[in-house]
Image (cartoon, helix red, strand yellow):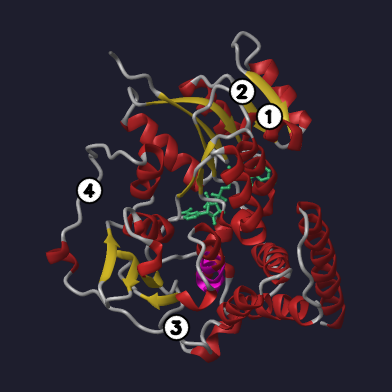
Amino acid sequence: MKKSKKRIVILGSTGSIGQNTLEIVRLFPDKFEVVGLSAGKNTGLLAEQIEEFQPVLVAVETEADAQKLRKRFSKSPVKVLSGETGLREVASLSRADLVVSAITGIAGLRPTLAALEKGKDVALANKESMVVAGDFLRKIAARTGARIIPVDSEHSGVFQCLNGQKKKFLRRVYLTASGGPFLKVPIKDLPNKSCGEALQHPRWKMGKKVSIDSATLMNKGLELIEARWLFDLKPDQLDVLIHPQSIVHALVEFKDGSVLAQLSQTDMKIPILYALTYPDRLESPLPSLDLTAVKNLEFYPVEKERYPLFALARRALETGLSFPVVLNAANEVAVEAFLEEKISFGQIYSVVDYCLQSHRAVSINSLEDIFVIDQETRNKARQYLRLKGKQK
Ligand SMILES: NC(=O)c1ccc[n+]([C@@H]2O[C@H](COP(=O)([O-])OP(=O)(O)OC[C@H]3O[C@@H](n4cnc5c(N)ncnc54)[C@H](OP(=O)(O)O)[C@@H]3O)[C@@H](O)[C@H]2O)c1
């Protein structure tokens, strides 16, 4: 009997992960069918994607953009929605088998929740959702039977190493970090590094927000919190190693001292492909790993003075409660201000530190608590930035 195609929805299809996912669909047209797409503002690219992949449902941020697309595709069966409601509708499309969650920031949380509530398997790239609401997402998935399959290369690595292993034998998990573009820069020069320099990631080509988070190493801090929830680990079971070659993505140490590692070429299409096919694997035309060409695999501890934001993230991981929500919201506001060249690289730390210092950790009892604390923190961070702007 002919096997049917896996029907996928891609939230954030115009972004780096979204476009890489569509590359996989191009490579395996007989395996996957795109049924839903969502974009923010890049309606030009979304229109090209609609023409090529013929989804039944798409969503964009504004109603004005949705109207333009409806006009353009008036002869096509595609339905165009807008705003948060539209996004949620695409995320919970009944005919979808898998939803790729690849929107940046907390904007990805509500659609990810909607997909899990509908019992859809989620290939999760949007780490911010797990950081702020990991416990809720896990419980919803357990209730509805949905699976959360990691897309982040490090988490995909851990996921693969843990496959078939008993959790009680696990000792520790290491995520690797390339160290970003400032691994070798003198620490005294870091506060004034420009946006252009911070966006030059040495190994991965990614969206702007995650690239800046990689330069500060906040990205790895967020990933530790993501891993804490994805794999149900204690904070002291999680660690990070600087590994400039980005070939080993994760290592899992067991109680008997044995360590399993996951290695691959530095190409996000590899973990995306695994998330799309899990638990199966497809014969892939993506490049194989040649370790004789790589030659050296180096590992270093994280330098605290070089990456002060990582220490804040570690503290949020250990404190738990509302701290990860504050960490994430303050960081999103600070990175946006840095990308708009309103603050220096060094001030990203000041904003996040200020918001955490002035917050008294409280327990999170509902999803609504998360949105309230997120909004309060954003207001506080913006107020701090306005005050600092006036003091200049
Ligand atoms: N890139 C990587 O290699 C990588 C690796 C691991 C994990 N991740 C994670 O994956 C997520 C996506 O990263 P990315 O690098 O693909 O980001 P990106 O290139 O900036 O793309 C983000 C996508 O989300 C959409 N979007 C942003 N804000 C939105 C909003 N408020 N409402 C609706 N749509 C919105 C964007 O739409 P428009 O562009 O149309 O506005 C775009 O499609 C992040 O959480 C990141 O940490 C990325």
Give percent across and percent down for residue 111.
66, 40
* Between 227 and 290, the one nearer to me in the picture: 227
Three-letter residue code for mark 2:
Leu
Local secondary structure at mark 3 = loop
Local secondary structure at mark 1 = helix
Three-letter residue code for mark 4:
Pro
Q: From mark 3 to mark 1, how far is it between C-alphas? A: 42 Å
| Closer to the eye: label 1 or 4 | 1
Taking the image as shown, residue 35 lies to the left or right of residue 293, namely: right
Q: Is residue 221 magenta?
A: yes
**Looking at the image, is mark 3 or mark 4 earlier in the sequence?**
4
Q: Is mark 1 within 8 Å of ligand 1?
A: no
Three-letter residue code for mark 1:
Glu
Occupied quadrant, residue 350: bottom right
Which residue: 42% across, 79% down? 183
Q: From mark 3 to mark 2, how far is it between C-alphas? A: 44 Å
Which residue: 48% across, 60% down? 231
| Residue named by callout 3 | 302
Above or below for 318 versus 376: below
Give percent across and percent down for residue 218.
56, 71
| Closer to the eye: label 1 or 2 | 1
| Residue named by callout 2 | 57
Q: From mark 3 to mark 4, how far is it between C-alphas? A: 30 Å
Q: Is residue 4 magenta?
A: no
| Residue named by callout 1 | 89
Which disc is residue 287 wearing?
Answer: 4
**Magenta region: which residues?**
214-224
**Looking at the image, is mark 1 or mark 4 earlier in the sequence?**
1
**Looking at the image, is mark 3 or mark 2 earlier in the sequence?**
2
